[in-house]
Image (tube, rainbow, N blue to C red):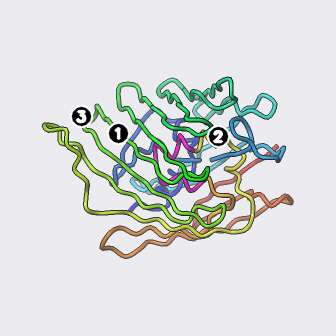
Amino acid sequence: MKNIIYYFSILFGVFTLASCDPSQDNNGDFLIGVDYNPNTNTGGTGGSTSRQLKQMISHLKDEDTGQFEDSNIVYSYSGTKLISYKDDSGETTKIDYNSSNKISKVSNSGQTSVFEYSGANVSKVVTTFAGVAKITSTYTFNGGKLVKVAAIQEFSIPVPIKSYLETSYQYQGENMTKSVIKNGIYDPVTGELVMMPEEQSIAFTYDTKKSPYKLLPTEYILLLAGIGPQGGAYLSANNFEKITISNTGASGEVMSFTHTYDSENYPIKSTTGDEYISYKYQ
């Protein structure tokens, strides 16, 4: 089972596209770098608040080396619209919009994601990692809420492989309370999809404060959910207090979080153990 870095990989989508060195976890999730992310205010589908998320700083432990690593993401806006963000290596990721003010493309030097829509909802996102992989993610909504993401992942290195990852979501009010994840592999000879018997279940409980990820474009969070599908939970209105991860036939792993808030009830720091993520706003 992944440690807390597994959780933060999903949590900060910003960092997902900030790295050009993708990797695949034990469950087949295509998670790049250290992080993950969602929104409803700046750019794309928006909320009513004028506040903007300006910066996220993480202090997380690398589960392979046991060493702490610090990351820094800075967001740039044109008016209320998120147009780019830069990581601490200097890599800038650009965000383009279509005539309906929806995200049409997210790109940097090593990755490009192109969006398709059905009415107001994202229907498909195709993400290409240059010389490494392509992920085609399709989305299903019910009553305006994301209920399923199905991703076909085609890797060219280290060896050619085609896999399938499906995540279904359950809700209570405006919070996503459960994700159920299934995966499979396409037979390289017959092309037939062979599903694995195991499933992973992730249950979430929340505080009653405002999530900083709701300040980022909803379409961007959906992109991240297509790359690391559990990340769809960051479409929720509030902040995680506890996450319980269970695999078929195994006992669950529980992660608990504490938050400190500003005067507007947004978190300025989220902590679990010795690891944390801090947020700055404007």
Q: Which quarter of the rendered picture does the N terminus lie within? A: bottom left
**Mark 3: few, some, or many residues within 10 Å (few <14, many ≥20)?**
few
* Kind of residue indicated by mark 2: Ile
Q: Residue 177, located in which quarter of the rendered image?
A: bottom right
Q: Earlier in the sequence, mark 3 or mark 2?
A: 2
- For label 1, the crowd category at 10 Å Cα-Cα, with few meaning under 14, some 14 to 19 and many 20 or more, is many
Whole-Å distance between the Cαs marked 3 and 2? 32 Å
Say whether residue 232 is magenta.
yes
Residue 131: x percent and y percent?
35, 25
For mark 1, give the secondary structure: strand
For label 3, the residue is: 160
Which residue of the protein is positioned furthest toward the left in this rendering?
189
Relative vertical location of residue 203 with respect to residue 6 in this rendering, above or below: below
Q: Residues within 10 Å of mark 2 (few under 14, many from 20)?
A: many
In contact (CB < 8 Å): disc 1 and disc 3? no
Query: Is residue 46 placed above or below 78 in the rendered structure?
Result: below
- Quadrant where the C terminus is found in the figure: top right
Kindly report the secondary structure that dominates the magenta region of the rendered protein.
helix
Quote the CA–CA distance across marks 2 and 1: 26 Å
Q: Secondary structure at mark 3?
A: loop
Q: Which residues are magenta?
A: 222-234
Work out whether mark 2 precedes mark 1 in sequence or the reverse, and give the earlier one. 2
Residue indicated by mark 1: 153
Give x and y (percent) for residue 215: 72, 46
The number of callouts visible is 3
Residue beneath the point at 67% across and 40% down? 217
- The residue identified by callout 2 is 73
Disc number lying in front (2 or 1) = 1
Q: Position of residue 144 (x, y in %)?
A: 61, 50
Residue 6 pos. (x, y %): 46, 56
Q: Amino acid at mark 1?
A: Gln
